[in-house]
Image (cartoon, grey):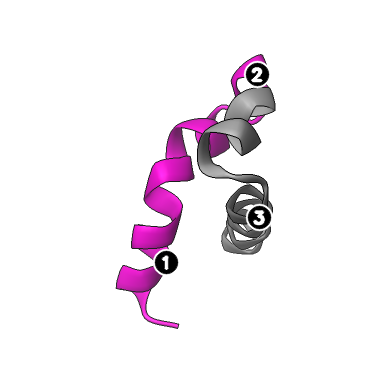
Amino acid sequence: MDIAVIVKFLAPCMPFLLAMGNKVAEGASQKVGEDIWNRAKAIWAKLQM
């Protein structure tokens, strides 16, 4: 996958992904959509490995 595509996909989710331990993440699925949020979390988890 192209890095530009990953960045474009994750950009709207970054504030929530960076604050995962906070209550901010609770409303993330409402802001960006449930499906996008779940995909973003999966990609983020793989990038942190």
Residue 35 on image: x %, y %: 66, 55
Amino acid, disc 1: Ile
Q: Which mark is residue 35?
A: 3
Residue at image coords 69%, 53%: 38
Secondary structure of the magenta portion, mostly? helix
Q: Position of residue 37 (x, y in %)?
A: 62, 48
Residue with the mark numbered 1: 6
Which badge, 2 or 1, comes first in the chain's sequence? Answer: 1
Q: Secondary structure at mark 3?
A: helix
- Total labels drawn: 3
Q: Between disc 1 and disc 3, whose residue precedes?
A: 1
| Magenta stretch, residue numbers | 1-24
Q: Residues within 10 Å of mark 1 (few under 14, many from 20)?
A: few
Amino acid carrying label 3: it is Asp
Which residue appears at 42% of the width and 59% of the height? Answer: 9
Image: 13 above or below 42: above
Q: Which residue is mark 2?
A: 22
Q: Is residue 2 magenta?
A: yes
Viewer-proximal residue, 11 or 31? 31
Dot 1: element: helix
